[in-house]
Image (cartoon, helix red, strand yellow):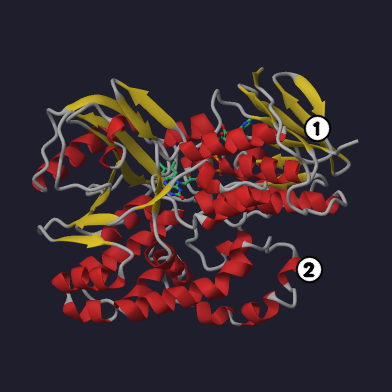
Amino acid sequence: MAKQAIVVGAGLGGLSAAIHLRLSGFEVSIFEQNVRPGGKMNQFAAGGYRFDTGPSLLTLPSVIDELFAKAGLERNDFLEFEPVEPICRYFWDDGQRLDAGKDVEAMKAELARISPADAENYADFLRYAGRIYDMTADIFLHTPIHEVRKLLTRENIPAFLRLLKIDPLRTMHQGIGRFFKHPHIVQLFDRYATYNGSDPFKAPATLNVIPYVEHGLGGYYIKGGMYRLVEALSELALSLGVKLHLSAPAEKIFHQDRKLRGVVVNGDFIPADYLVCNADVVTAHNQLIDGFPEMRKKLNRLEPSISGLVFLWGVKKRHEQLTHHNILFSRDYRREFTQIFDRREAPDDPTVYIAITSKCDPEHAPAGGENWFVLLNMPYLKDGQDWAAITAQMRERVLAKLKQAGIDIRDQIEIEQTYTPADFYNHYGSNRGSIYGISSNRRSTAFRRPANRSRLIKGLYFAGGASHPGGGIPLVLLSGKMAAELIAEDAGVAAKGQQIGHRVTEITES
Ligand SMILES: Cc1cc2nc3c(=O)[nH]c(=O)nc-3n(C[C@H](O)[C@H](O)[C@H](O)COP(=O)(O)OP(=O)(O)OC[C@H]3O[C@@H](n4cnc5c(N)ncnc54)[C@H](O)[C@@H]3O)c2cc1C
């Protein structure tokens, strides 16, 4: 008889774990508390406008290609990845502007308009960041690093010995300062710390790998909307025979004598030997898993990543000065991060990110209009924050900042929806509203991030942004893969790739 596995949560990490487990021959049931799969990768539509509510940029698309290939399928037949060029248009308060992209010569020309000396160093910076990628990818992205026997393999040991070369002792900002001097250009590259929800003035320079991943390897949009990824992964899971239960919240993960016993969903006890928890690890230990107070304390001491305030605006005019991805920078980045991470308050001059998918998919907005996804960096939750008041205040600041940049949309917004850090906690259970799991503000974070296999409860595994290797689309997909591979090993099933065929099953709503 096939072994059974349960997945709690149908975020990207949970979907990936379910697909990998099914491909290893497990009977898999996913229990998702919401009415739709996808977790923080979600969508919203109203008044002829359609929006993604979470991720807007895909990096490392090969991770998705490999997932489909493992199921014996071509990703191209299900999803179209469109390279975004320019990847992002940057605006500063003094009127300067820069289009950043993958083409090295075009990028150098753009940088040279702001600082010829810095432009000269761009190729060296990419080489430095690319080297970090080459030295870290196998260890940090593809290995469950808490498993010593996997970490210290013959293949990994040379990379492990080179770890000091990945610039872990400087901060990201200091690492960038070795190549660039102009404050605008430093700010542009500092910004990549936010891709995993961290502070460039604290996070280790190893994270300078992120601009390489985007500029060196490319940034992509998923044609039709980012949510197409969730639809395609859900369809793949279902076609393989995974059972997806929606509106099915796990109320308790049961264990006894340090062994997993099962899960309670909508009041029913479901026994299980193997369970992947895609719910945030910290929230799970706070709410779903009884006992282990020391572990709970330890997890709650880890600093959550940044959160976000999202405005979805259906704008009834087109704005040709904007492209698909845009950033309007704050005047003082250090102050913005001090406010967010140290004072845990909304920044008085926020950096404003605007993604407009109707630039690529015109049907995402009525004729003549645009669908704006606007994201501001925000602190994670603490007592005493009044998100209704903060939202109203930040809305004014964003509209004023846009007007100053010559983009006055105050009378053009015909659809509006907002998501605050409290919503990220309430809708998805993200620890204190964090959107990328645990911040990388400490050098040791990569090793302190919760493991994919529970050390306390046999049969319990974790996948998702709050566990190894961290937040962001490709990383959470890899975390699901690692959790599934560990289960396959523990169950004595070799994770060999496709072991089962495709079949048609249904989604159930409990
Ligand atoms: C505004 C925003 C912008 C972002 N931009 C990008 C970007 O451009 N590029 C990028 O790569 N990443 C981006 N990210 C990050 C990315 O969205 C996340 O890292 C990723 O989607 C998280 O996936 P996950 O598997 O950790 O699960 P989550 O998305 O957190 O999903 C967990 C799932 O578990 C469910 N769940 C929780 N508790 C229970 C329970 N008790 N019972 C049943 N189900 C439960 C939740 O409902 C949810 O569906 C962004 C995120 C946000 C919010």
| Image mark count | 2
Note whether ligand 1 is within 8 Å of mark 1.
Answer: no
Q: Nearer the viewer, residue 337 or 323?
A: 323
- Where on the picture, by quarter, is residue 500? top right
Q: Residue at x 72, y 30 (%)?
A: 252
Report whether 475 appears left or right of 185. right
Q: Is residue 35 above or below residue 128?
A: above
Which of disc 1 and disc 2 is earlier in sequence?
2
Q: Is residue 337 left or right of residue 394?
A: right
Q: Secondary structure at mark 2?
A: helix
- Helix, strand or loop at label 1? It is strand
Question: Which residue lies under the disc numbered 1?
Answer: 262
Task: Determine which quarter of the picture holds residue 222.
Answer: top left
Residue 127 at least partly seen: yes
Q: Give x and y (percent) for residue 164.
A: 55, 81
Which residue occupies the extreme right position in the image? Answer: 1
Q: Which disc, if any, is residue 208?
A: none
Alpha-carbon neighbours of circle 1 within 10 Å: few (<14), some, or many (≥20)?
many
User: What x and y, as percent, mark residue 315?
Assistant: 20, 31
Would you say 4 lies left or right of 106 here? right
Determine contact: label 2, label 1, CB under 8 Å. Answer: no
For the residue pair 354 and 364, the one nearer the viewer reads as 364
**Residues under labels 2 and 1: Cα distance?**
28 Å
